[in-house]
Image (cartoon, helix red, strand yellow):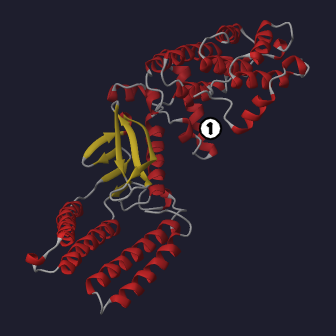
Amino acid sequence: MVKQKYGTLIFSFLTVLSAAISIYFFEKEFLFSLSFAIGSIICALCAYTEHLYEKEKDFQIEKSDFSTEMIINYSNVSLAISFLGYLIFIIVGIYFISLAGTDYQNYKGFEYVMIAIASYFIVAYLFKIFKLLKKVSQKDILIINNQGIILNSEKMLWSDIKNERLIKKQEHREHSKYEVDVQYLTLNYKNQKVEFQIDDLDQQDYKIEKCLKFFRAKFQKTDFRNPEKQERKTGISIFENILKLNDLFSLPEKELQKNLEDIRLQATNYPNELKSYCESITEFEETNLDSIYYALSENTDVWKEFLCNEFIRLFEIAKKSNQPKAIFNILEEIFYDSEPSSASRKVIDYLYQELSNNDDKIRLKALISVDSWLDEADFTKGNIIIQKIQKMTKDHNWKIRWCANDILSSYNIFTDDEIAIPFQDKLNAKLNNQYEID
């Protein structure tokens, strides 16, 4: 369904247009007219759906009937739209047969083609209507409550669920060569990825999303501060229930800060489990490590040794990975905001070695990363790292040359001639992403 500001107006216009065409052809071609009459009903239903979607965008779950649980079924309106759409194809098939006539002995090649197309439409869409009717009888498709999520009668506890969220995918719909946005509920359940299409449900996407966050937060309030109890019940790490960073920042400021404090509290109470959990992560696309590192980086005086070791560990994994981008994105959440220490110097020395890596991607990431770890005391021409970065203004890769120039320019210790790069590099940087190498 198209979700846009003017969707109601567009579908209302199409409703009137289809109705007018239906009336015009009513006496001349009844079946043809009937197709547009049904099309008019479909457009009217779409306009109504659009109106409801826009009208209820300020929905608040705390003030609704869903504060105990949300029971979601297939949308009757959506099923009606599908049914009427299939019915149009059946009518078109009957219309083709009426054009060909029933005198099959006088058929020519074209009439046989029409009959074949008509037969396909009638049989195929009758079968689709049969499948659609089975959906009508299905109840309680998706339930979200304090305990977890029930999907098609399968109960999944919050303690076993990770990274639940709504996503959009570009997909081809039937009989269309164009890609459209299709929405899914996606989550990880006991290390298995689960995806479920939500476009045809009777609750809007934003309601489902708010409901997921509401019940996840309720679960965390009751369970997150009782790790021993949770461990007995589920046998999983207490850190698995931490939200991803994007989900954390979608919370109100007060709740965000409370979640960050909870992460730091549990990390303080269970440092060994924290280390084990971080080291157990092997899939970095769907992980909450970014939230953990971000929360702990707000107190680097306490967590500097852990964070610095994690930075080097993940950088090493990224070097060997075929898809290092997700890992580098996580590393961006480790930031050092304390006085220089042996831990931070260990990271700087490590990145200095990686500035000579043969892989352009790794060399570029090391260059960008070392800039955020250096201290003002390092900003001298005599510093070996600064000298290495100056040499990188002559690197064979223009992105590395540009980044080296950009970093050194911010230090104000070199003249423009000493760190000069070709004009073409500056032009490329305006037209391309200079921080990523494909």
Q: Is residue 213 left or right of residue 140?
A: right
* SS for callout 1: helix
Rendered residue at 46%/77% (across/down): 14
> What amino acid does circle 1 point to?
Gln
Q: Is residue 336 above or below residue 350?
A: below
Q: Depth check: 119 or 212 in front?
A: 119
Assign the C terminus to one quadrant of the image.
top right
Residue 143: x, y in percent? 33, 52
Is residue 311 in view from this perspective? yes
Rendered residue at 62%/14% (across/down): 308
Rendered residue at 59%/17% (across/down): 311
Rendered residue at 88%/17% (across/down): 418
Q: Is residue 165 above or below residue 49?
A: above
Residue 293: x, y in percent? 59, 25
Q: Is residue 232 left or right of residue 110?
A: right
Graded by Cα atoms within 10 Å as few (under 14), some (14 to 19) or many (20 or more), the crowding at tag 1 reads some
- Which residue of the protein is positioned furthest toward the right in this rendering? 415
- Which residue of the protein is positioned furthest toward the bottom in this rendering? 27
Residue 238: x, y in percent? 44, 27
Count up the numbered dots.
Answer: 1
Assign the N terminus to one quadrant of the image.
bottom left
Q: Is residue 127 above or below residue 307?
A: below
Is residue 264 in view from this perspective? no
- Which residue of the protein is positioned furthest toward the left in this rendering? 105
Residue 216: x, y in percent? 45, 43
Q: Which residue position is annotated with label 1?
A: 257
Q: Is residue 277 above or below residue 428?
A: above
Q: Depth check: 287 or 20 in front?
A: 20
